[in-house]
Amino acid sequence: MFYIKPKREYCRKHGIEYSGYMCPECRMELERATKNKQSKEKVEHNTNPPKSKKYDDFMTLEETNKVANKAVEKQKGSKPPVLREISNSTVSPRPKVPNWLFALLLIFALSILGIGLSAFTRSPIPFWLLLGFSIIYPIEKWFRKTISNKPLGKCYRFALNLVLLSSLGFLIWSGFQLVAKQLASTPLRSSVVFFAEWVFFIWIWRKVTKNSWRFPSMKLTVFSLVCIALIFAFAGVSPLSSYKDNMVTKWEDYQDEQVMQQAEQEAEIEAEQQRQQSELEKAGVARLKAEDEAEAQRAEVSRQAEQARKEEQFKQELEQQRLISIEHFATLFNEYRQSYGLSTLTFTDDLNKRALFRLPELELDFSHNSTENYNLHLAENITWASYTLDNNDAFLSWKGSPGHNANMLNTSYKYSGYAIGGGYAVQLFTEYPTINGEPQLPSGWYWDD
């Protein structure tokens, strides 16, 4: 919805601007002239009564009074009151109370009421609101002609602008006081006072809008007040100069605080950058250290892998040498049996492993007692030497021992196992195939331990 400002006209008679079809002062003059004309017609009517409906001539005053008394007596059925006789002389109007007296009475009454309300609410705002209303309302109602004077109209408009600005300031201050619960004695009274301020602000705004055609405008008033306040403040007029000094001091403190905050922020940024740089350096050192550790770990893994490979290779070589040694001993052994016309024995992996398991036990206890029962249900030849023992030495040692030789030339044995190392040699004998070193007896047979 758009508001179109009406076109303003200029009244040459009164020297004022107006909007509408007629100047306010001209309209008031027309109303007064109309009232005077109506009062004159009434006096003339009472002085020269109209003709009777029955007769063509005019009734006299006595006849008019008699007709009126009879009509009243007929309506009420009682003795008619004595009517005021209309004299032939001109009727003088009742004396009128002057408007300035009404205005003073209104100001006095509303001021007393405002004092009472201010004492009740413990706030001076009701008094000032009612006082402003009691001054502005009579001017708008009864003294429009007075303020039609151009200088008085300008002063009145300037006063309206000041009242509007003061009302706005009071409204803002009261809003803060209302939020802080310090406007009046109770929250309800505070709310009522704030509402009254709001109503007064709207009313005075309407009055300012109604007189917007007058000079000076609100913008000019605000600009003038600001300029006057600045001039007085810089000229040293109290209390504006003290306000100015306080504001300048606060502004300088604010600037110093901003500089300090900026310096602190820069220091914090520099410290943060240094911290990040140190963290990056630490991270770089940690990364290098981690890379070195990873490299060392990789080197260690490679070394362990190489060592494991070498150990495995060494084990394979040892195993290969062991197998070669077993094959060499088996050749010597079987040739020896064949020289006696006996069958050869089969050297099995299972018995070879059992013989190998016996070597560590012989280092602790050189006897036929196996702690793990590796030679259980098996015949066994063992030997040792303080020097390096080889297959020939072991074979000759057992060949030269009657008991060991009897095992070597036993005709019932079919399977054998052999191991040599650490200066010790072991040979196992059995008649039946073995599983994990245990001879597998025929069905129905068992060991009588």
Image (spheres, rainbow, N blue to C red):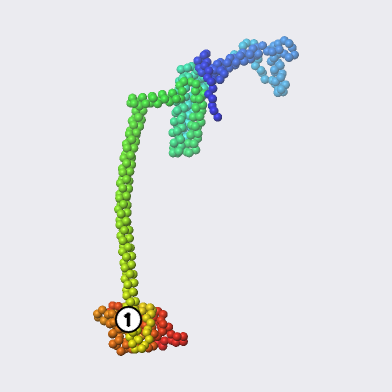
Q: Position of residue 429 (x, y in %)?
A: 36, 84
Q: Residue at x 26, y 79 (%)?
A: 388
Q: Position of residue 417 (x, y in %)?
A: 36, 81
**Camera-nearest residue between 121 and 136:** 136
The answer to which quarter of the image holds residue 92 is: top right
Q: Residues within 10 Å of mark 1 (few under 14, many from 20)?
A: many
User: Vertical placement of 11 versus 313: above or below?
Assistant: above
| On-image quarter of the C terminus | bottom left
SS of the residue under disc 1: helix
Q: Amino acid at mark 1?
A: Phe
User: In the picture provided, is 250 more to the left or to the right than 136?
Assistant: left
Q: Position of residue 369 (x, y in %)?
A: 33, 83
User: Vertical placement of 291 versus 258: above or below?
Assistant: below
Q: Residue at x 47, y 31 (%)?
A: 126
Quick one: which residue is furthest to the left in this view? 387
| On-image quarter of the N terminus | top right
**Camera-nearest residue between 257 and 238:** 257
User: In the picture provided, is 125 more to the left or to the right than 277?
Assistant: right
The residue identified by callout 1 is 329
Quick one: which residue is furthest to the right in this view? 54
